[in-house]
């Protein structure tokens, strides 16, 4: 599927000849570097957040005091809120997004439920006579990838909207159109299944090696060059070796992400092997009060589940 912008019959000829005015809401640890890349690439960006972002305004962004003002000023809005309920809370009321919309493309970068995204798109299309359209575009790569502009961007939606979103998001990484609306969220669920499996395996292996007297730095440097190597290992090796689980990508978000993966397994009739064990492990991590730690907390989690052998 091409990433080149395609003709959108819902937009006038005048609109198709000018660049989209892009906005963003959800300017946290991921949204902030995304906003910076968009602003650098486009020279302008409309931003809305719970608190002012003077550093973005100083760099050339336009501040929108309310969601309505954001929708009035932008043709397309990138959403990096934690989940769909956070977006839905901004839709209604005199200062909500829907009070300020003409034609609008909502690009949902949140990790969310694929059926939930489809249901929201249907409601918004019905409410606005098709003026508000939705694509899903969750990302992978973490805060490091966001800062470097190397995110993997998983897009779901119709061809024209997906191509438009890909053009907008290209400065932030590699956007790929994977299928109809919801495909991006399915891809992200698959991604999180792999990441959760990998970080738990790395944590458990680290405990085994440490208790057996191995040099952890030498071990993971060696294994990174073989089949055990991965981006997860590359990004978390130092933390695993040092036992440092200070927050970066916090573990508690995996509970939600794996629930979405489980929903897809149920919807597709897949008798998952790993998902039940992964969900139980991350539920236990949160129950033990470790949910706000980095996902490399898997080492501490495994180590604390049982005493070292005598």
Image (spheres, rainbow, N blue to C red):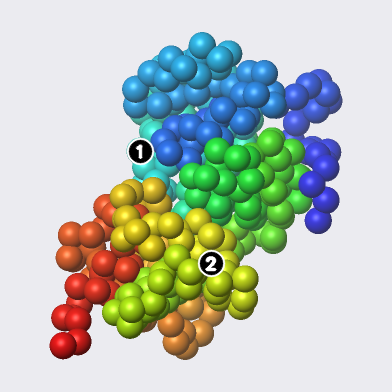
Task: Identify the residue at horizontal 33%, vertical 82% (top origin).
Answer: 212
76 w.r.t. 205: above or below: above
What number is the disc on residue 89? 1
| Residue identifier under label 2 | 221
Quadrant assignment, res 284: bottom left
Residue 256 shows up from this direction: no
Quadrant location of the N terminus in the rendered image: bottom right
- Residue 153 appears anywhere in the view: yes
Q: Earlier in the sequence, mark 2 or mark 1?
A: 1
Q: Residue at x 19, y 87 (%)?
A: 309
Q: Are marks 2 and 1 in contact (CB under 8 Å)?
A: no
The answer to whether residue 273 is above or below residue 152 is: below
| Residue closest to the eye, 12 or 185 | 185
Residue drawn at (69%, 49%), measured in percent from left and top?
Answer: 175
Distance from disc 2 to disc 1, alpha carbons, whole Å, reads: 46 Å
> Could you say where residue 207 lies in the image, as x and y percent from the top left?
32, 75
Foreground pick, 87 / 56: 56
- Residue 255 tag number: none
């Amino acid at each position: 599927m091409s990433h080149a912008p395609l003709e959108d019959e819902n937009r006038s000829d005048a609109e198709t000849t000018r660049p989209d005015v892009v906005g963003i809401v959800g300017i946290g640890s991921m949204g902030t570097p995304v906003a910076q890349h968009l602003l650098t690439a486009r020279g302008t960006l409309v931003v809305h957040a719970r608190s002012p972002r003077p550093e973005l305004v100083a760099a050339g962004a336009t501040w929108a005091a309310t969601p309505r003002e954001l929708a009035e000023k932008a043709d397309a809005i990138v959403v990096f809120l934690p989940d769909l309920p956070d977006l839905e809370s901004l839709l209604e009321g005199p200062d909500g997004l829907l009070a300020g919309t003409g034609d609008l493309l909502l690009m949902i970068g949140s990790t969310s439920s694929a059926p939930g995204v489809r249901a929201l798109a249907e409601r918004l299309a019905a409410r606005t006579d098709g003026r508000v359209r939705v694509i899903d575009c969750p990302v992978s790569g973490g805060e490091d990838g966001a800062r470097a502009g190397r995110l993997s961007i998983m897009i779901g939606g119709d061809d024209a909207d997906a191509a438009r979103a890909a053009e907008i998001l290209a400065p932030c990484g590699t956007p790929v159109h994977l299928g109809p609306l919801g495909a991006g969220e399915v891809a992200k669920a698959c991604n999180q299944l792999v990441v959760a499996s990998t970080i738990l395996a790395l944590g458990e292996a680290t405990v085994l090696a440490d208790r057996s007297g191995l040099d952890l730095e030498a071990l993971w440097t060696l294994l990174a060059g073989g089949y055990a190597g991965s981006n997860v290992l590359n990004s978390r090796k130092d933390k695993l070796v040092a036992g440092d689980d200070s927050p970066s990508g916090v573990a508690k978000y995996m509970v939600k992400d794996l629930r979405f993966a489980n929903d897809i397994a149920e919807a597709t009739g897949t008798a998952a092997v790993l998902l039940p064990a992964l969900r139980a492990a991350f539920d236990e991590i949160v129950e033990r009060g470790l949910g706000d730690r980095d996902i490399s907390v898997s080492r501490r989690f495994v180590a604390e589940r049982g005493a070292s052998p005598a």
